[in-house]
Image (spheres, rainbow, N blue to C red):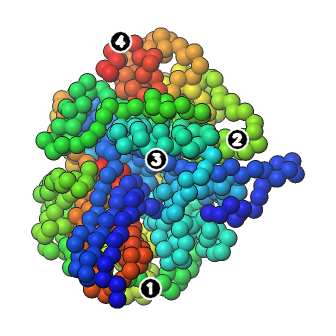
Amino acid sequence: MKKTCNVNIKPLTRVEGHGNIRIKIKNGKLQEAKWEVVETPRFFEAILKGKKWDNAPWITGRICGICSIGHTLASIRAVENAFGIVPDEQTRKLRILLKHMETLQSHTLHLCFLVLPDFMNTGSVFPLIKTHGDVVLRAAKIKKLANDVCDCIGGRRMHPTRTVVGGFTMLPDKEELSGFSDRLKDITLDLMLVAELVKGFSLPDFSRETEFVSLKGVDDYPFIGGDMVSSDGVRMREEEYKKMTNEYMTDQSTSKWCRLSRDSFAVGALARLNNNFEFLHPAAKEMAEGFGLIPVNHNPFMNNIAQLVECIHVVKESIGLIDELLDSEFKESRQEVKAKRGIGVAAVEVPRGILYHSYEFDDNGKIVKCDCVIPTGQNHANIQHDLEGIAEEYAAQGKNDRELELLAAMLVRAYDPCISCSVH
Amino acid sequence: MEAGETGTRTYLGVPLYRPRVAFFEFSSCEGCQLQILNNESTLLDFLSLVDVVNFREAMTGGSDDYEIAFVEGSITRDDEVKRLKKIRKKAKTLVALGSCACFGGVNQLKNRFKDINKAKKEVYGRHPIDSEPVRTLEDIVKVDLKIYGCPVKKEEVEKIALHIAIGKSIVFPKYPVCMECKRNENICLFELGEPCLGPVTRAGCDSWCPNSRAGCWGCRGPADEPNMEQMKKIMEEYGFSEETIMDRLECFGGFSSLMGKGNTK
Ligand code: SF4
Ligand code: SF4
Ligand code: SF4
């Protein structure tokens, strides 16, 4: 049995942004396990200071290329909350649909392009084009559909152009929208096939009791706005986000860390699912159960499965949303914006977990204070604790460097971290 | 990916040389790289055109032997300077990918703080953090080619890669976004009461934003010989404040050398 291990991953690949993993085991005892975030900060919160409200969604969307739609929508909601603008039904539906498709796009990218290679023993998705072309093409087909819908509603799949405070600059073409309905029905089957493939993989069997934080639905699975809950029984309103996140600085990271009832908590698909299982679409619930994913599940690797389950959920819900939108009369409903002094907070579930934007405005609608709390920023501390836990467990089992390296990388990857986003 | 893994492409029946390509990122949202993975229908075509040997966001085990480096992001820390210089040494051709790399992008708005410590304090309080004023790639090393946009257009990146592969020169439009916008028969945003930088911004995006009835914010930087005076006049004529113009002109950094008085930098 090997008793000494040295793992040094610098930087971790197949994740967004720059982070390092270091593990040292000596004589079967864990000496060090560290998740370091070295990404350069871009100072978005300072950048927006003194800028007028209309800059906020346009600029903060650039915090992240993968979830730019989520950031844009969170930013818009924060501004609207500050100015007392309530979006109408049509705008709400279009925004949810747009967000659903970003979720589908992002989850698929993570599962099929970034995670899959770990289970197929390759370094990237590229060699799989040749060996498992059907799988890659299927993933590309799902992603393409999701991105096409984002183009149609948001004007652009990344850094959307039509989404503004008050509504949309332009509405999607109804005919184009109706075309997506059949394609969504069609990819339900593709998602099932991905699930079949994933069923064949054995996820590492590791659990560590964790507090899970997410929005809490009232009648349905939550995505935009509402109360936050934790699996330890905390419940708070959107405006109280600071008490839910408790950001603090640490030397091992350029991103801030968070805590709530314990040393750390987790956000993301698994947290959402753990806290809102009852609201999943029946087909999604069935899939979750098929994977033995029943709340509250404490295996961080199950976040991958939770993402897959959410893919089915958002596809099913989107089919319904498109039907409703097509049945209704489209109206140009962009609301006029009247800036005023005040504070606006938004909590939005983006692919990697709950995202908060908060702005304080002066009388002229200029930003006095801006604050963004990013899902991955909330996960860093939990990743650190999981890493220690897994290293400890496997140190005792005498894994070799290579095995431990893969496991540690897979653990962090399971969180689908968006590191540059977390540092912003 | 090993060389030759996807089918070799031909052009007029002649097999194309597949250059070894690497992707790197500095301070950025990684969106420009993602654009490469984001156009699923042509991704495989693109991969048959180039041999991707290093792409941290998508692959483990990247190689340091490459000819073309696509570099995204702006430079904000000393370790980035060193890493960029190393890439420059290895690459035959260094391409600045996206507005962060070309102009500093939205990141350079940080430079409005004359004292960077103020920006640091705003975000991190008294916790020490390492960050310098934002610089473009060209501020540090020689850049062979710039691809503008926030984000870049995938079609443009692909066309450029093809041109590099067949040794054809690359020409960017000299004219402004307005030309594309008119060709697309959009209603001019000024008529709808919205500000737009289309008259002075370099085309190539096919008037991406105006097509969605959203004003241009100049993400691709200035067209050749932009008439800034006239731009200001139009803005004033339609009743937009100096601040509205400035917000757009300074957003991505492309106009920084053209901004006259009122530049807060
Ligand atoms: S130019 Fe824009 S899209 Fe590209 S990396 Fe920079 S912020 Fe992201
Ligand atoms: S909308 Fe903008 S780009 Fe289009 S014609 Fe008007 S000013 Fe030019
Ligand atoms: S219209 Fe302007 S802001 Fe929009 S993509 Fe083109 S150059 Fe960039």
* Residue bearing the label numbered 3: B25
Tell which tag, 1 or 2, sits nearer the viewer: 2
Tag 4 and tag 1 share a subunit: no
From where the camera sits, is residue A296 visible? no
* Residue bearing the label numbered 4: B261
User: Residue A371 appears at what percent x and percent y?
Assistant: 22, 45
Disc 2 versus disc 3: distance between alpha carbons? 21 Å
Please, what secondary structure does the residue beneath circle 2 have?
helix
Horizontal relation, residue B35 to residue A95: left or right: right
Horizontal relation, residue A147 to residue A238: left or right: right
Residue lying at 28% horizontally and 71% vertically, measured from the top left:
A24
Disc 2: CA contacts within 10 A as few (<14), some (14-19) or many (>=20) = some
Tell which tag, 4 or 1, sits nearer the viewer: 1
Tell me the subunit letter for badge 3. B
* Residue bearing the label numbered 2: B164
Tag 2 and tag 4 share a subunit: yes
Instruction: Name the residue type under label 3.
Output: Glu
From where the camera sits, is residue B237 visible? yes
Residue lying at 34% horizontally and 50% vertically, measured from the top left:
A39
Q: In the rendered view, would you say B41 is above or below B116?
A: below
